[in-house]
Image: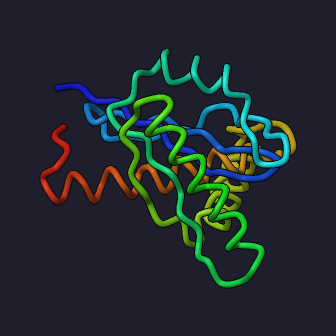
């Protein structure tokens, strides 16, 4: 059975977005969403969810190691609650440790190979990071037998 997944890399200014499918077991970045002080454009978010109809939404979970990351984690938890309670979505966590650095390297390599022709934008990094942790999440689920391809 075909399942689609959406990942969000939550940020105060931009939110990275990625889409994945169990048929191909691949995750790809989408256009990032602009955030206003940690608040998404809910209408745009609802349209994306309606368009892709994800079986599960995967949220990146950052390392919490200072007051700043604690405040961000509080916003992410509120966002998760809104997705689950207001939009009736299944939401799971994925660790996003070092995905931003991995995303920068991946995009830099794509530029060197001519796949990307313009300057790498911050939102691109966020969406590539979302694709990376979504891919890791799907691979783990596949290995655990929870997602079939």
Relative placement, left or right, of 72 versus 129 is: right
Relative placement, left or right, of 37 versus 11 is: right
Is residue 138 positioned above or below 104 on the image? above
Relative placement, left or right, of 113 versus 80 is: right
Image point 70% across, 63% down: which residue?
72
Of all residues, the one furthest to the left in this rendering is 145
Q: Quadrant of the N terminus?
A: top left
**Structure colour scheme:** rainbow
Q: Which quarter of the picture shows residue 70?
A: bottom right
Q: In the image, residue 94 lies at what x, y percent?
A: 44, 60
Relative placement, left or right, of 128 versus 91 is: right
Q: In the image, residue 149 lies at what x, y percent?
A: 19, 37
Q: Which quarter of the picture shows residue 114?
A: top right
Image point 77% across, 45% down: which residue?
14
Of all residues, the one furthest to the bottom in this rendering is 65
Image point 47% across, 66% down: which residue?
95
Q: Nearer the viewer, residue 134 or 57?
A: 57
Q: In the image, residue 147 lies at what x, y percent?
A: 20, 44
Image point 72% across, 36% down: which residue?
40
Q: Nearer the viewer, residue 139 or 44?
A: 44
Q: In the image, residue 67 lies at what x, y percent?
A: 75, 79
Q: How many marks?
A: 0
Is residue 56 positioned above or below 122 on the image? above
Q: Nearer the viewer, residue 120 or 33?
A: 33
């Amino acid at each position: 059975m075909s399942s689609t997944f959406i990942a969000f890399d939550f940020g105060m200014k931009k939110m990275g977005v990625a889409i994945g499918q169990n048929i191909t077991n691949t995750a790809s970045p989408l256009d990032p969403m602009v955030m206003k002080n940690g608040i998404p454009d809910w209408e745009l978010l609802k349209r994306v969810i309606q368009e892709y109809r994800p079986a599960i939404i995967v949220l990146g979970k950052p390392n919490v190691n200072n007051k700043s990351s604690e405040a961000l984690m509080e916003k992410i938890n509120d966002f998760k609650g809104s997705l689950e309670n207001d939009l009736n979505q299944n939401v799971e966590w994925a660790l996003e440790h070092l995905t931003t650095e991995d995303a920068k390297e991946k995009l830099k390599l794509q530029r060197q190979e001519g796949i990307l022709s313009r300057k790498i934008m911050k939102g691109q990094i966020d969406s590539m990071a979302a694709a990376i942790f979504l891919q890791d999440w799907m691979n783990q689920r596949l290995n655990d037998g929870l997602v079939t391809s």
